[in-house]
Image: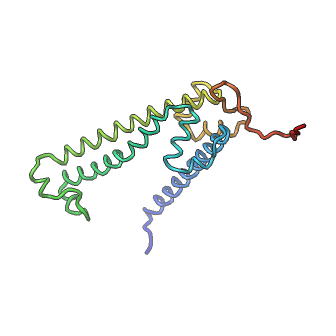
Amino acid sequence: MEMSSHSMPIAFLTTIYMLLVYAVSALITVGSWIIINKAKEEGWSIMVPLYNLYIINKIAKINLNWSIIAISLIFPYICGILGIIAGIGLTDKTYNDNMIVPLIPDGMAAQIPYIGEMILILSVLTILTISLYYVIWSIVWSLNIARHFGQSTMFAVGIIIFPMIFLPIMAFDKNIQYIDSTQKKIDYTPPTEDITVE
């Protein structure tokens, strides 16, 4: 099967875009791994879903309740996305007829007027509310993590806007060390001299 001349540039641009997304994701993951190691936690924990929320909140000295709320909002977020799909399916008859598995039977849609629009509006509001929580959590986390690594508020703003730049800076700069709650720097570099006990 041959590709048309119009689809080749789109495929090329999509491939370039996906490679950039993977590169940025890898950069953020490696930077986060090293940052967690600097805080004397296990770096591999960044790769474990849900547990990584607990660890990064622990490093930033954020209350455990933020992690519990963040984890508990995953299911409503997914339901909101499914609600948008169902709402679109109920408002657009051609889309609903082409669905493989209808999310809501046609009989219910016929009995309740504007059910598709109501589901769509409630789902969008749910997703916007949950997204607002994650934005607030991201701001609080960035401010705390910058403070615990001895950085300014402007550095925290940089983490919020450009995490792919500022997290690796924090990770790879040897002068940026984790400061625990007693305001003592934790040395990340291993000792170079042998310690003998007499």
Q: Report the residue that reaches farthest toward the bottom.
A: 1
Picture quarter with the C terminus: top right
Marks counted in the figure total: 0
Residue sitting at x 29%, y 42%: 124
Where on the picture, by quarter, is residue 158?
top right
Picture quarter with the N terminus: bottom left
Where on the picture, by quarter, is residue 146?
top right
Residue sitting at x 25%, y 63%: 101
Nearest the camera: 27 or 56?
56
Nearest the camera: 146 or 57?
57
Left or right of 134? Residue 120 is left
Q: Report the residue that reaches farthest toward the left.
A: 111
Residue sitting at x 65%, y 27%: 150
Residue sitting at x 17%, y 58%: 105
Which x, y percent locates residue 88? 24, 51
Q: Is residue 100 above or below residue 149?
A: below
Left or right of 179? Residue 94 is left
Q: Report the residue that reaches farthest toward the right.
A: 198
Which x, y percent locates residue 40? 67, 39
Nearest the camera: 118 or 67?
67
Where on the picture, by quarter, is residue 70?
top left
Which x, y percent locates residue 60? 57, 33
Which x, y percent locates residue 126? 31, 40
Q: How is the image coloured?
A: rainbow
